[in-house]
Amino acid sequence: MKGALPFLLLAPALLALVAVFVVPIATIGRIALYVSEGSGAMREAVALDTFRTLFADSFTWELTRNSAHLALLCASLATLIAYPIALFLFRTESRFRPLLAILAVAPLLVSSVVRVVGWLVVLGDQGLINAALLSLGLVDRAVPLINNWTGVVIGLTESVMPYVILSLLAGFGRLDRTVEEAAATLGAPPWRVFLRVTLPLSLPAIALGWLIGFVLSFSAFVSPKLLGGGRVFVLATEIYDLAMQAVDWPAAAAMALYALSLTLLVLAAYTVLTRRVAA
Amino acid sequence: MARLALEGLTKAYGTAPPAVDGLTLEAEEGEFLALLGPSGCGKTTTLRMVAGLVPADRGRIRLGEEDITAAPVHTRGIGLVFQSYALFPHMDAVGNIGFGLEMQGVPKAERQARVAEALRLTRLEGLGHRRPRELSGGQQQRVALARAIAIRPRLLLLDECLSNLDAKLREEMRGEIRDIQRASATTALFVTHDQTEALSICDTVAVMHRGRIEQRGTPEEIYERPATRFVASFIGRMNAIDGPAPVMTREGPLGAGETAMVRPHRVRLLREGAAAEGDNAASGTVRRITYIGDIVQVQAATPLGPLAAEVSGASPLWRGLDVGAPVGLAWSSSDTLRFPA
């Protein structure tokens, strides 16, 4: 009985995980093996036809490139911006620290759709930025900041930043103030302390933050869909279009599995790399 | 190598009484000075101000001819051995020791030679390519010391750096630190709360209490001629007798509002019936016998209050003595100090 207790306590979580994660994925896996008829009807089968079509289509590779490109850009930008913020939050002895930490992750409290609408207001042709630029006479015509890649990159970077900040804070464990003080007493000016001590010791945190940013950006749907204005094509938006507009469920399921396995591949690469570095 | 002079150094945190309060202290060139005091007396704050890690509110810090009170940390040329060692975990021992030389722009060939020299001096040969976590506590301590002396500092600061080692290793490192300091003739300031450490390895000891220096002197002066009641009771073991009482001290009879102090090892233990010699005596009954090995401490209740005497562990005097047995205690007035209570 004593041995069973841990399992009993874990049971609710395991059941929930099976219900919301394992079952849907298994279902998608099953549907991906169905065959779409030319008429649009779905025929029950165990066939790899859908995958064959998927991998033969050059558009799949373009989408993969776009997704990877977007994720790379957003994860890197978000890490770059989040790093100083996270370092400050980690270091500060201000009594406002808890408040500042909440502010930094506050975007998580707002629905991503609402946040995107906010970006439309800021980045639109009549938005805050363009109105300011136009009235200052810095540009003659509104700079297109939405319904294109620029808009998607700005919006997505912002939306993954809170996660990156949290991962950085979690990863800063090895950062020790006295080690930096030691470097200073040995004659290192502040910038050299940063380059030789702070930065190397925060590399694990940076890797973790970047990875979280990458995975989230890679699978992001709302920002590319709404800020891209139908001109930015990535795997997530295509899966949606296939499932909801073309109503080609097997194709959508196959692409979803493909995107998922790419994410897992990145995670595996990260695990192998960090293991090797730690060893 | 330079003379260190602290003049009226003050640092307060918030509204609490200043951690360091108008502290004035000097260390001569090549001197090994201990800053000894109980925890919270401000000694670490003093050390951090000297290193430049904490700004001073008031006062001056002079190193040689130079006023370094406001100089940035990295320009001070002071070697600091941290209590936690603070080694760079991502560099091996050679990287740690060579870091300061690299910052000074010492060419690679010379750097390697000086790192090798520091490794030899701290008996770390063959361990140069180990990372800190692959080294034992004592070895890490040596790397920290080697790192601090490799830059040929004008001043070496040691912050309770032996307190994380076990007793045996600590004793060994004491001697080594002393040798290394002497060989390099570096002025050194050693912050510690451990009096044995301070008395045994330093030329001079400054006893610190509530942010000020109570007394500065050689270990012997501090031990034999404590200047204040605090120093007398903080260093070594001490019997205290509150006046008025029929006790003669070095400075005369003990009056009201005064305290007489005598070290237990200066108090002779007399078995019942023995004639009391010396100008101070008390009789009482044994309350506790503590066997420490080399010495045995006998505590007795007397009309003057509780008094302790220490005898050699090999002495026959304490053998057969039981709690409750009547004993006599005698001591000389020349061993008895008098302080205002």
Image: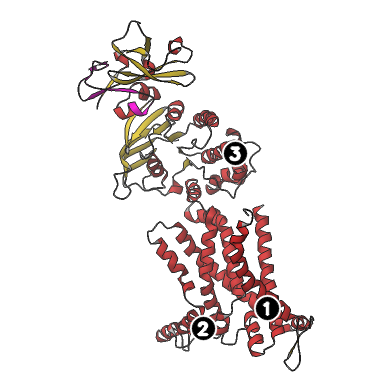
Q: Residue at x 56, y 54 (%)?
A: A201
Residue that appears at 44% across and 18% down: B296
Percent of width and height locating residue B201 = 46, 28
| CA distance for labels 2 and 1 | 29 Å
Q: Which mark, by number, is residue B254?
A: none
| Tag in front: 3 or 1 | 1
Query: Which percent across, then down, holds residue B39?
Result: 39, 38
Q: Residue at x 60, y 45 (%)?
A: B133
Mark 2 belongs to which amino acid? Leu
Which of the pair A131/B149 is nearer the observer? A131
Name the residue tied to disc 2. Answer: A145
Residue A190 colored magenta? no
Q: Where is residue B114 in the image (x, y as percent from the top left)?
A: 58, 39
Tell me the quarter of the picture where residue B297 sits.
top left
Q: Is residue B51 visible?
A: yes
Q: Is mark 2 on a helix, strand or loop?
A: loop
Q: How crowded is mark 1: few (under 14 residues within 10 Å), some or many (20 or more)?
A: many
Dot 3 corresponds to which residue? B136
Q: What residue type is labelled 1?
A: Ala
Say what secondary structure mark 1 lies in. helix
**CB-based contact (under 8 Å), mark 3 and mark 2:** no
Task: Point out the image quarter for the C terminus of chain B.
Answer: top left
State how far apart marks 3 and 2 are (Cα): 58 Å
Mark 2 vs mark 1, foreground winner is 1
Residue indicated by mark 1: A256
Residue at 62 percent across and 68 percent down: it is A15
